[in-house]
Image: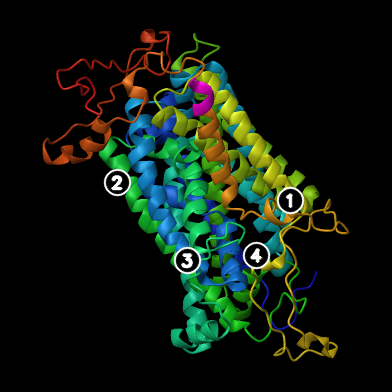
């Protein structure tokens, strides 16, 4: 398909910039494969040997959350629904605080590799298996979509080769994950954050120059009703209001930051608990920076096209393509810069995919292989971890190929993740915050939460909410000097979000559809979490939840919070990780065989490893 006339195309320099980004990422992988004696143990491979410091980990957390879906999706979101999206800045603060003060202390003091080990320690093997399987399925599906969606959008606008891009990103990712382990994943992420900020900055600066200053951009947006920051409508059916973003957004993102293996694995790999908390709080600054960049891009997008919307004028076929279209439109005189933007979008993809691959390898090794094959040496576990990375890399590329066939199901698959995340967050919250929860309550709660969120989520797919719920803002096309018929003057009404293959169009709207299925998508995860916690508590009480004798380490205690102030009392208390002889494996609980925890101390604190 020829790119529309009037906007630029890709030139050699753009491909050079893009290839350079891939090459540097691969080089970092090679470096960490051999630096410092290579990947001797599975702990080195999966946890960076637990010697990471706060800043690279923080940047890495920012990068992996920022997939290409963010780079291409958020500006479009602002363009179509207005800048209320920026309220997420407040949400991010709550998310980071909850992750750092509720989930991190428990995971860190247990010294676990896979978050699902915690489920076995606190409940039993069956709960752990449920969690693990849900995570693996969710992540492979999600990663496939993350690889495919941006490749498609960029391909249709820039003519950038679709399968070349998909396979190249997949192969490079798998390559540096397999060779360099978590260290390579973290340092490539640091590099990729740099690329993303550069890509965003080039678009914003050029747009400001072309539109004649930031005040013009804000003026256009104000006149177009795009600066709709304050919408305090408490109705849970409206897609984005102050309350849905603060409450729903907090639950949705906490399920990613607080308990998702690919994020937790990183901050647990820090060398001390203070570093781990710092990494989360520094990462908050990264999240804010990216949010500001993408909202500014969205406003620039609106300012540029406020009187001629390329989507309604049929210049692009999907809203995701607006951002690449803008880039080719305003950066066509600067060879190499459109390539930088594409590199920026793909950096998002690479960082998300690489963290997924590493997390999948960790979960498989820790949860599925180690418990069944106790006799494996560390060296062979390291090899198995690398083999797993290759396997999952191939699987994710395969998923991307599947995603291309699903097409209309992309949206469905993406929202299924909101549905899986909620109940899992509820499961961990039960374990950490509710002392009397037991395994029966946990499993029944998980099933109930899962059932409810699937019911709402799939309902919302089949019968998408009406435009008055999603409240898209008006897009104009009167400024297009096009030779189309004159009907372009009519302001277009919005298509409902998902154009699924299986929508029932002719059905008259029932109250169930207008209320229950029209729930804001941000509340799916909230609903799943609350149902899981509530049912879990109800079931645990009559099934003997009060009688179990639990180890205090598995719960959030007030020492965990007070120890934030230890910095003022003592200097160094860093975990010393010496290399351990292999013979001490095979104790009952694989999570504890390396660290002796001797805690009966008069103060009830832990004396062995000062955590």
Mark 1 lies on residue:
512
Proximity of marks 2 and 3: CB atoms separated by less than 8 Å: no
Q: How far apart are the two marked residues, 4 and 1, measured between alpha carbons?
A: 17 Å
Residue at left offset 62%, top offset 71%: 80
The percent coordinates of residue 199 (x first, y second) are 50, 67
Q: How far apart are the two marked residues, 2 and 3, measured between alpha carbons?
A: 24 Å
Quadrant for the N terminus in the image:
bottom right
Proximity of marks 4 and 2: CB atoms separated by less than 8 Å: no
Residue 236 position by quadrant: bottom right
- Residue found farthest to the left: 569
Quadrant for the C terminus in the image:
top left
Mark 2 lies on residue:
278
Sequence-wise, the earlier of marks 4 and 1 is 4
* Residue 86 numbered tag: 3
13 versus 479 height, above or below: above
Q: Nearer the viewer, mark 4 or mark 1?
A: 1
Residue at left offset 55%, top offset 77%: 226
Can residue 182 be seen in this snapshot? yes
Q: Is residue 383 left or right of residue 312?
A: left
Q: Nearer the viewer, mark 3 or mark 4?
A: 4
Mark 4 lies on residue:
470
Q: How far apart are the two marked residues, 2 and 1, measured between alpha carbons?
A: 46 Å
Q: Nearer the viewer, mark 2 or mark 3?
A: 3
The percent coordinates of residue 407 (x first, y second) are 78, 53
Q: Magenta stretch mostly in which secondary structure?
A: helix
Categorize mark 1 by other alpha carbons within 10 Å: few (<14), some (14-19), many (20+): few
Q: Is residue 594 left or right of residue 153?
A: left
Q: How far apart are the two marked residues, 3 and 1, measured between alpha carbons?
A: 31 Å
Region rendered in magenta:
537-541
């Amino acid at each position: 398909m020829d790119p529309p006339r009037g906007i630029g195309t890709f030139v050699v320099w753009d491909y050079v910039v893009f290839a350079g980004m891939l090459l540097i990422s691969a080089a970092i992988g090679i470096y960490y494969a051999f630096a410092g004696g290579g990947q001797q143990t599975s702990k080195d491979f999966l946890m960076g040997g637990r010697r990471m410091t706060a800043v690279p980990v923080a940047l890495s957390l920012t990068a992996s959350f920022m997939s290409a879906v963010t780079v291409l999706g958020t500006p479009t979101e602002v363009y179509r629904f207005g800048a209320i999206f920026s309220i997420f800045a407040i949400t991010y603060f709550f998310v980071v605080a909850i992750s750092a003060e509720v989930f991190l202390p428990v995971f860190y003091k247990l010294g676990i590799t896979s978050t699902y080990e915690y489920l076995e320690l606190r409940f039993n093997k069956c709960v752990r298996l449920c969690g693990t399987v849900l995570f693996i399925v969710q992540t492979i599906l999600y990663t496939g979509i993350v690889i495919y969606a941006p490749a498609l959008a960029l391909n249709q606008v820039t003519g950038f080769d679709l399968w070349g891009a998909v396979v190249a990103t997949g192969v490079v990712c798998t390559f540096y994950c397999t060779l360099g382990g978590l260290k390579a994943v973290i340092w490539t992420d640091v590099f990729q954050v740099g690329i993303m900020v550069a890509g965003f900055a080039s678009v914003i600066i050029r747009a400001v120059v072309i539109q004649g200053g930031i005040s013009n951009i804000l003026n256009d947006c104000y006149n177009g009703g795009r600066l709709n920051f304050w919408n305090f409508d408490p109705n849970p059916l409206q897609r984005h209001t102050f309350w849905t973003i603060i409450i729903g957004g907090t639950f949705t993102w906490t399920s990613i930051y607080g308990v998702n293996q690919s994020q937790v694995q990183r901050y647990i790999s820090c060398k001390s608990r203070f570093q781990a908390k710092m990494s989360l709080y520094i990462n908050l600054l990264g999240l804010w920076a990216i949010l500001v960049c993408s909202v500014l891009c969205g406003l620039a997008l609106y300012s540029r096209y406020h009187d001629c919307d390329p989507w309604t004028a049929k210049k692009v076929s999907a809203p995701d393509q607006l951002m690449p279209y803008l880039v080719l439109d305003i950066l066509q005189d600067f060879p190499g810069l459109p390539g930088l933007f594409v590199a920026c979008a793909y950096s998002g993809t690479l960082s998300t995919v690489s963290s997924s691959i590493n997390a999948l390898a960790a979960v498989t090794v820790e949860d599925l292989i180690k418990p069944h094959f106790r006799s494996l040496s560390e060296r062979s576990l390291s090899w198995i971890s690398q083999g797993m990375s290759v396997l999952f890399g191939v699987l994710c590329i395969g998923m991307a190929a599947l995603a291309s066939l699903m097409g209309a199901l992309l949206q469905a698959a993406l929202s299924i993740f909101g549905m899986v995340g909620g109940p899992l967050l509820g499961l961990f919250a039960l374990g950490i915050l509710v002392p009397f929860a037991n395994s029966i309550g946990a499993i029944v709660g998980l099933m109930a939460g899962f059932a409810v969120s699937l019911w709402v989520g799939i309902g919302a797919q089949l019968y998408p909410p009406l435009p008055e719920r999603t409240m898209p803002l008006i897009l104009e096309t009167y400024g297009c000097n096009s030779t189309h018929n004159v009907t372009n003057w009519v302001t277009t009404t919005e298509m409902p979000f998902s154009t699924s293959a299986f929508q029932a169009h002719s059905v008259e709207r029932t109250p169930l559809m207008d209320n229950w299925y029209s729930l804001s998508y941000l509340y799916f995860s909230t609903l799943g979490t609350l149902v899981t916690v509530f049912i879990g508590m109800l079931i645990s009480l009559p099934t003997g939840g009060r009688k179990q004798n639990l180890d205090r380490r598995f719960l959030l205690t007030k020492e965990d919070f007070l120890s934030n102030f230890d910095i003022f009392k003592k200097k160094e208390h860093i975990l010393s990780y010496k290399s351990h002889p292999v013979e001490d494996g095979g104790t009952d609980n694989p999570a504890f065989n390396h660290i002796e925890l001797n805690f009966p101390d008069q103060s009830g604190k832990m004396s062995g490893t000062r955590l």
